[in-house]
Structures are given as C-alpha cells and as structure tokens.
Amino acid sequence: MKILKKYLIVKWLKSFIASFLVLFTLITVANLLTGLLRNNVTVSEVLANYFIQIFNYLSLIVPVSSLTASIFSINKIKSQNELTAIFSVGMSRSVFLNNIFTASLFIGILSFLALAFVGPKVASYKSKLIKNPGTKFLNLKKQGLITSTIGSGYFWYKSDDYFVSFKKYDHIKKQISFINLYKLKKNGLLDKVIKSDNVEYIANKWVSKSVSYIESLSDEKITYQKTQKKFTFPIREKTTDLLRLSADISTLNIIKLSRYITNLEKAGLNTNTYKIILYSSINIIFICVLLALIASIDIFKPNRRSSSTGKSIGFIFVFTIIYWLMRSYLVEMGKTSKISAELAIFSMPVFLTLFLTMIIIKNRKLT
C-alpha cells in the first residue's frame, strides 16, 4: 500500500510541475515583453524587476496548478483503468484523497515559505539591483504607512494624546525632518501645534535647535512663538518605533509584518491593506489544498471514462479566469475597506470548504 500511495503522490506532483511550468512561462513571457517595450529602463533592470516580482505570481499560479494537477493525474489514471484497480485492492477513497491532501499541503507550505520569507528578502535588494526602482516600476514603489497619506508625502501616526507627521526619518543619523506635532487636550480638542525642520535623537530624547509652536488653539487667546534655543521635542516614540512605522512592508517577512500591523493598530490607523498581504501568504496553503481536493471528486465515479483533454483544458481555462477575477475583486474590496481583510481573503476558502464538505457528505457511503 505504501508503494501505491507513493505512486499516486508522484503522479500528482508530476502533473503539478507540468502545469506550473506552463502557467509560469506564459506569465514570464508577458511580463518580460511588457518591460522590454518600455524606453526608460534597461534590459538588466527589466530582468531584475521580474526576478523581484516572481514571488507575487505564486498566489496566482500555484492554486490553479493544484487544481490542474488533480484533474490531469486522475484522468490519466482513469484512462488506463488504474483507478478501479486501485480501489479493488483495498484503498478507500478517503485514503486516496488523503494522498492528494498530503501532496497539495506540501506544495502549499513551500509556497507559504516563499511568499512569507523568501519574497520579502529578495525585495530588500531592489534598491541595489535597480537605481530609483520606485520611479521606474510602479510595483516597486515603497509600500507602507506613507501610502496612507493621500499623496501628501508625509508619514502620519497617532499616539495617545497627539498626532505626528514627518517628511523623512534617517535611521542612520537618527534624525527626523520636517516634523509636526499636534497636541490634544483630554476632551480631544486640538490645543497646540509644534513644528521643527529637524530633530535628533540624543540621550534618549528628541532634541531640536529651533522650533515654532502655536498654543491655546482651543481657547480664544491663540499665541504663536518661535525659539532658537535647544528644545526637547515632546514625542515618546523611540528610534526603533519610527523605524517600524516607516518600514517598507514589501521587505518585511510575515513575523515583522505582523508586528508592523500591531504597531499601526495601536496608533489607531487603518491596517486593511497590510492585513491582506499578511493573510494572503497564509491563505495560499488552504486554497491549494481545497482546489486540489475539489478537483479530485471524479474518484467517486471510477468506472466512467475520463473527460476529453479538450474539455479539461476548457474547464481549467474558465475556472482560472473566474478565480483570478473573484480574487482580485475581493482583494480590492478589502483594500478600500468596503469589507474586512479577513472577509476579503478567507471568504473564498470558507465557501470552497463548505462545497467540498457537501460533496463528501453526499458520497460518504463510498469513502
């Protein structure tokens, strides 16, 4: 029985690899041709951008390849009358499905590791591989808190009793450029605004050589002052906090990204966009397994001849289009906060799980 299980898993993996290579080649050709037609980038930059973006394609290619692997591997076994023989020697359908589950879970975990750890690590080298990557390729623009500033170019965050905006944070010099602090009263009204062109972290304090501030904004007597004296800028965040807030999330692995989201939530910021990135890397495990199992339901009819190759390819093509469109639609809904990030990412796996459960219940006598 062990030999038979190994045979089925190898058969599935071979079909998966063949499907993956076909889809990967199509996306590669389309991506490279699009890049090479541009005039403002070199061939080496196009190749570097493609190499960085490879891991983003996994969430599109791997689930469809899992579906395709189950369809073609089972059809091939059926066409050779092997499926009936497999069940006649004592292997149950539940054991057969367990083999598909094992193979697809292995692929899902590998994809998760690639998306959650390898991809961000490769993305961290984009500035070394491409000069000014954000200006040449839109997909390589820095992602993170700055994308939530509605084009102002400033980073924003909220603490317990103040808001802060700043233009740039230099983690090497430990300096913040063009910082504005909006101090709030206990009743939530704006009380004071403090501005400085540059503050520096010295002896666990943020120090500025000159500041200007407006006081008593919630009262009738508004006062404006400017000082050239050494001034301790009243923000509580440390250098490590600012480094996390201003991080490029495309370079953060799943652990660091989770911490980043936690920091933003503590600051009262919307984290839907970042949660979608986090959940997508986890979701690929579930979606790979579910599509592989759903595509295996033909085992409940082992005596029926396999569908023609043309019909199988047609079904895969239609399903792929529908799957990609539905996935893109839900993700965009989540990014715009029309639905929660959890619903945007996990609604499809939940639906597929319910569908698979119904099929198994319907054929429980055969399992």
Image (cartoon, rainbow, N blue to C red):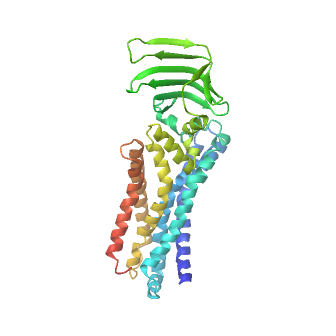
Residue 34 vertical placement versus 199 (above, below):
below
Q: Position of residue 54 (x, y in %)?
A: 58, 52
| Quarter holding residue 139 | top right
**Looking at the figure, which quarter contains the C terminus?**
bottom left
Q: Position of residue 120 (x, y in %)?
A: 59, 48
Whether residue 352 is visible to the viewer of this picture, yes or no, is: yes
Q: Position of residue 48 (x, y in %)?
A: 64, 46
Residue 125 vertical placement versus 207 (above, below):
below
Residue 268 relative to residue 357: left or right: right
Q: Nearer the viewer, residue 286 or 315?
A: 286
Whether residue 73 is visible to the viewer of this picture, yes or no, is: no
Q: Residue at x 40, y 27 (%)?
A: 186
Residue 329 vertical placement versus 194 (above, below):
below
- Residue reaching furthest bottom? 89
Q: Residue at x 40, y 79 (%)?
A: 305
Q: Position of residue 67 (x, y in %)?
A: 46, 65
Residue 67 relative to residue 203: left or right: left
| Quarter holding residue 21 | bottom right
Residue 159 vertical placement versus 232 (above, below):
below
Q: Residue at x 39, y 24 (%)?
A: 189
Q: Nearer the viewer, residue 2 or 19?
A: 2
Q: Residue at x 36, y 73 (%)?
A: 360
Q: Nearer the viewer, residue 184 or 110?
A: 184
